[in-house]
Amino acid sequence: MRRLDRDRYLTALLAPASRREDLFTIYALNAELSRVPESVREPLVGRIRLQWWREGIAAALRGEAPRHPVLAALAEAARRHALPWEPLERLVETREEDLEPGPPPTMTALLAYADGTAAAVMSLALAVLGAGPDAEAVVRAGRALGQAWALVGLLRALPFHARLRRRLYLPTELLARHSIRQRDVLELRPSAALARAVEEVAGTARTRLAEARAVTVPRPLLSPFLLAPLAEQHLGRLARAGYDVFDPRVAAAPPGRLWRLLPWAWSGRF
């Protein structure tokens, strides 16, 4: 966890001690699923692996104890917190979409992708932390922050996805509107047009971040929302780089992240 998803790992360190290990489990499961599309060359192989995970997750929710350590831990977390199936299924389905070629067609489709990745993880984290039916506003804020975090992550990872996976997540309608050829992005060619498109996606991330921050979150549910200051930091770096996603500063991990989070955790805000 510490290596695969450092940011979420740091936020979980600031969660109530009794819930921390189960948060690590959710984040580790997400990391395992996200690695599947990156580790296969043939979509069929990826689908087989994701189906294995789907069946293992279903078994864990039934109370069975699969041999895989992450699934065994998930079975325990599900028993303690009555984890819902729907966001877990969305995590698997969205990674299946990652196996298909081509970018999402629209910004709406990109936000749906964000719903099935970071927003689904946020939903599960809030379930672990005890968000009940009376926490509807907090759950909505979690979804908004999850969308923002996903967009920020996709922008920062654009060179990685283009170079190693030949995959773009900028919507085709956005590329067309800015007269950007997919081939140029896949060949890592920066341009003013690409910077404008990236700025537009970053603007959507900022809007979702502001929506999340408009909600007061009870302290016991706060830890996953501590991604917000990190998202803000990443967006600031992106802006200072002129929205050039190929600038090395954009993807670099900022130093002192835990120390940046501590004042927010102590204040009960994000």
Image: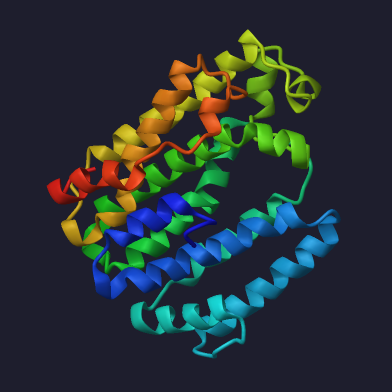
User: Up-down: is 230 above or below 202?
Assistant: below
* Above or below for 186 versus 253: above
Q: Nearer the viewer, residue 186 or 138?
A: 186
Residue beneath the point at 49% across and 62% down: 1
* Residue 186, image x, y percentages: 76, 28
Tell me the colour scheme of the image.
rainbow
Would residue 32 be found to the left or right of residue 12 on screen? right
**Residue 77 position by quadrant:** bottom left
- Residue 105 visible in the shown view: no
* x and y, in percent, of residue 195 in the image: 58, 15
The C terminus, quarter of image: top left
> In the current view of this chain or complex, which residue is farthest to the left?
267
Give the residue drawn at x 52%, y 28%.
250
Residue extending furthest front? 255
Q: From the viewer's perspective, is 195 left or right of 269?
A: right
Is residue 134 among the parts visible in the rendering?
yes
In the picture, residue 109 is in which quadrant? Answer: top right
Give whichever of 52, 233 is nearer the camera: 233
**Looking at the image, which residue is at 28% across and 56% down?**
223
For this view, does 177 lie left or right of residue 65? right
Q: Where 63 sits versus 150, above or below?
A: below
Position of residue 101 measured from the top left corner of the image (x, y, whole percent) = 79, 42
